[in-house]
Image (cartoon, rainbow, N blue to C red):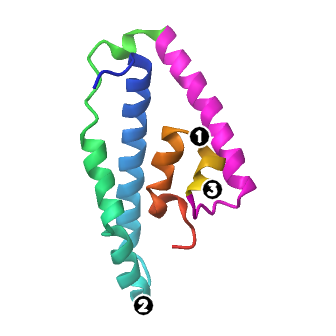
Amino acid sequence: MIVSPGYHISLVNYKQKIYATMREMHKASESAHPANRAYVNHYLNYEDFRSVEGILRAIKPLPQDAYKKPRLTDLVDAMKDIQEHRLSKNLIEISYVIETTSDATLVAGSGLRAEIVSHFPFVTNSSG
């Protein structure tokens, strides 16, 4: 699949953020209360959670010259800020509870973004 350079930069940046968050979750699981460890381990080994790693692995690294284009990286950063602000506002409005595809659409908008969000309840569904 061919993606635009700006989109590719965003993918790689989020890949790094998601991996970092997953590492933090696994590290934090070591300090879970003994009575909760089975639940935490189940959550961290849930099929949907594990499938994220496979999706991230499919994202190819950036070419060497990707960050040598300051105008492009500035545009990517500006769009990221706009999108993250919109998503945060929408998540606050629904108290961070995404239980249905309709909830995901409300947060992310229609199309592929909502479809992606709805497939990751471990990240978005606080009641799970």
Mark 3 and mark 1 lie on one chain; the one further toward the N terminus is 3
Q: Quadrant of residue 47?
A: bottom left
Q: Quadrant of residue 8?
A: top left
Return the residue at label 1: 110
Under mark 2, the amino acid is Ala
Instruction: Indicate the secondary structure of the residue bearing disc 2.
Output: helix
The percent position of residue 28, horizontal first and vertical second, equals 41, 68
Return the residue at label 3: 103
Q: Which residues are magenta?
A: 71-100
The percent position of residue 42, horizontal first and vertical second, equals 34, 76
Q: Is residue 74 left or right of residue 96?
A: left
Q: Quadrant of residue 38?
A: bottom left
Instruction: Indicate the secondary structure of the residue bearing disc 1.
Output: loop
C-alpha gap between disc 3 and disc 1: 11 Å
In the image, residue 92 sits, relative to residue 2, either above or below, namely below
Please identify the quadrant where the N terminus is shown: top left
The percent position of residue 109, horizontal first and vertical second, equals 61, 41
Return the residue at label 2: 35
